[in-house]
Amino acid sequence: MKNLPQEFIRNMQKQLPENEWEAFFAVYNEKPYKGVRINPLKGEPAKIRPLLPFLEETVAWEENGFYTQEEKLGSSPFHSAGLFYSQEPSAMSASPLLEVQAGERVLDLCSAPGGKGTQLASRMNGEGIILLNEPVSSRAKILSQNVERMGIKNAVVTSELPERLSERFVGYFDKILVDAPCSGEGMFRKNAEEALGEWSEENVALCAKRQRYILEEATKMLKVGGRLVYSTCTFAVEEDEGQVEAYLSTHPNMRLIKTEKLYPHRVKGEGHFVALFEKVDGESLTPLKTVKATAGKVALEAYKAFEKTLFHTAFAKNLHEVNGVLYALPDNVFDWKGLQTLRVGVRLGEVKNGRFEPNHSLAMCLKKEECKNVVEFSSTDTRVDKYLHGETVEAETENGWCLVCVEGYPIGWGKAVNGVIKNHLPKGLRRI
């Protein structure tokens, strides 16, 4: 058994039946479970799965989730293409409970690095608005990168404290996920050194206090009839069942629908707690100003010329320009002015010297079939690795901008000049 804190051992012995103690503590001598979630925004999961031979059995609570033992998932070109997201299996249990629908307004309040938020977005098919928020700016940048890689068109990524958002979004969201910062007892096996080093009963109490504050602000932003999921990756009663009990005692307008607690000796996962609530009464929606997409003539003409040359049909609507940079905004997006905002919709690209230069974000939202000029490689082609390292590659195609694909799935832009593809993969994404 790993060097588990004695207080934690005593707490779990109080929580579990005596005949389960041995099985529970025995898991800490075993390898943690790893999971992968296929991204349906990139294509049919049934067609993607054969490309990922490291996938094993399906995760029971997520139809696109699979177990894996692969250690180097990030080295796969299909990771760069956004075909999958690495996610701990039991963590996949929270998002499905919200039953998010296309066209809804959804909030993931504590979103980084983006596992649950991108899971929610994958069910919206680019319709509606999903606000993904992370207060810590460095983590928000990672979140924004994952949103881009997964090809999410209808996301707004912010880095704000919950109370800053609740001031603006009273009664606005149909669905809210609060994956609250917690004491991380479910990480003892996965991230043993860090999780064990930070754990203490004092930290459990501190986390419970912070969770109460986050839930309070989240409740203000949920519309009447809307649903909220609260989740943690810990087993502490103060942060799980106790938190739910305290919340209900001070929020009679919230109805508990169900709770689930996944223990690592009962399921194939590290452990998770989830509670699903419905708001049955509360304040009416505060009308929010929406943004009217506007763009200058030069930027519009440059983009339309690019679109006509490269796409079979028009790709973007709601074209919005900020200082020469063009965006495709989600329908009826709220005015984000005054918020620390990292991403709104799709960054299409910018106008340079009168010509449009596409952004990587646009490439990650495209399907091969939408483009006229495509350079396609097999996953075993050595040119894929060269491209992902930022090198030029040789390939026969028409001169000009081209979409670089692996097995039919985009990984970035290139510019063809007489059989040589100049690399336009952002430097920050190039492999070292």
Image (cartoon, rainbow, N blue to C red):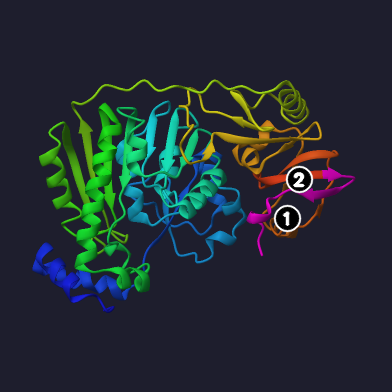
Q: Which mark is residue 387?
A: 1
Q: Quadrant of the C terminus?
A: bottom right
In the image, the segment drawn in magenta is 416-432
Q: Is residue 103 magenta?
A: no
Read off the residue under disc 2.
414
How many numbered marks, from 0 up?
Answer: 2
Label 2 neighbourhood size at 10 Å, few (<14), some (14-19), many (20+)? Answer: many
Q: Quadrant of the N terminus?
A: bottom left
Evaluate if marks 1 and 2 touch, with contact meaning CB atoms under 8 Å apart: yes
Q: The disc labelled 1 sits on which kind of residue? A: Tyr
Q: Is residue 43 visible?
A: no
User: Tag 2, which secondary structure?
Assistant: strand
User: Residue 325 falls in which quadrant of the image?
Assistant: top right
Q: If you read the primary sequence from the N terminus, does the residue marked by circle 1 or circle 2 appear first?
A: 1
Label 1 neighbourhood size at 10 Å, few (<14), some (14-19), many (20+)? Answer: many
Residue 210 location (% of width, % of height)? 26, 52
Q: Residue at x 55, y 28 (%)?
A: 329
Instruction: Give the camera-side residue of 29 and 302.
Output: 302
Q: Is residue 77 left or right of residue 260?
A: right
Residue 323 location (% of width, % of height)? 67, 33
Q: Is residue 65 left or right of residue 16?
A: right
Q: The disc labelled 2 sits on which kind of residue? A: Gly
* Cα distance between the residues tagged 1 and 2: 9 Å
Residue 402 location (% of width, % of height)? 76, 40
